[in-house]
Amino acid sequence: MPTYTDFSNKQQEIITLFTKGAHAECSQLLHQMEHEFPLMLDKLAFWKASLQLAEGKKKEAIMTLQQAFDKGYWINPDMFHMDDEFKALEHSADFKELIRQFDEALARKKASSRALILEKGNPEAKTGIYALHMRYSNAEIFSEVFLTPETAKQYAFGFAQSSQATGSHAYVWDDEKQAKADIEETLSLFQKNHPINDLIIAGGSQGGKLAVELGLTHPSVKGFIAVIPYIKEMTVMEKLAKAHVNDAKGVIIAGEQDAAYGQTVKLVQLLEDHHIPHKFISIKGMGHTIPEDFTKYLKEAVDYILK
């Protein structure tokens, strides 16, 4: 089953092909990905429309976005301002109508969105992993990274999903106050539903940052696993590390080609300075993505935390 890591790798391939002007190969890969990654149809439709605009196919681009919308997949309208290809549609009445539909859908989504916990794995497991998804992702997609037949038997999983909707299937943790409330609600429910002895907090990118913060402050946490944590500045982390009172161990997993790698190294040094037990897994050649064969690193991290 294709995972988010597979999607990220092919996403990079799409960017490379598009940059080289290899439009035919790019189109073929996008068509393949539509079948492999149905939960990513919102992003795929956006890229496909951008490619069609690069080829001067305005009507086809609008049709691609409309067809995705009719299936329930759409992106935040603000994203169109980040891609120069869509400037070609700024005077199109059909595109303006499509944006109006997206705006209305986003307003409805924000009004109805609530935090939730997606529970998977072994409900009787004594080790529970509570995980926080990446920015612009969701609980279902993020869960695919963690689950294999082996891990599903070993651990009880709780995948939290933010209430902060930003697209048809995309959520963020941008509002810190709301994020804290969502985490408290879903973590409490996860602990109530599972008789776990050892609680581990995990997260990716923006969720990785939150996993560190929660790992340093929650009294019942055994440890935390932060994968490619995205940390803009260290002030909050410094305060939390200084006030650290629990016995949690931390595992940081990062790619050396990640633009946020410098901040990650600072985080590791911060843990060192405050004598917080930790393990740093640095992966050569990897950027801001989940590592291939992630569950191998997951097991290594859990074993370190529990030993």
Image (cartoon, rainbow, N blue to C red):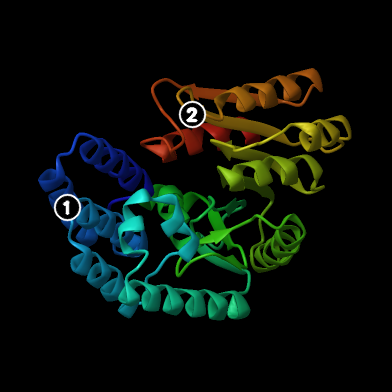
- Secondary structure type for disc 1: loop
Q: Which residue is mark 2?
A: 258
Instruction: Please report whichever mark, 2 or 1, sits nearer to the chain's N-terminal start.
Output: 1
Is residue 52 toward the left or the right of residue 104 in the image? left
Q: Residue at x 54, y 64 (%)?
A: 166
Q: Quadrant of residue 253?
A: top right
**Disc number placed over residue 139 in the picture, else none:** none
Number of the front mark, 2 or 1: 1
Q: Label 2 to label 1, Cα distance in Å?
A: 31 Å
Residue 307 is at least partly visible in this image: no
Q: Is residue 216 above or below residue 160?
A: above
Q: Position of residue 160 (x, y in %)?
A: 59, 61
Crowd tier of the residue under label 1, counting other residues whose Cα lies within 10 Å: few below 14, some 14–19, many 20 or above: few
Q: Position of residue 58 (x, y in %)?
A: 22, 64
Residue 16 or residue 40, whichever sits in front: 16
Q: Residue furthest front?
A: 91
Q: Which residue is mark 1?
A: 55
Q: Residue at x 73, y 55 (%)?
A: 176
Residue 19 or residue 34, whichever sits in front: 19
Q: Position of residue 110 (x, y in %)?
A: 59, 74
Q: Residue at x 64, y 47 (%)?
A: 201
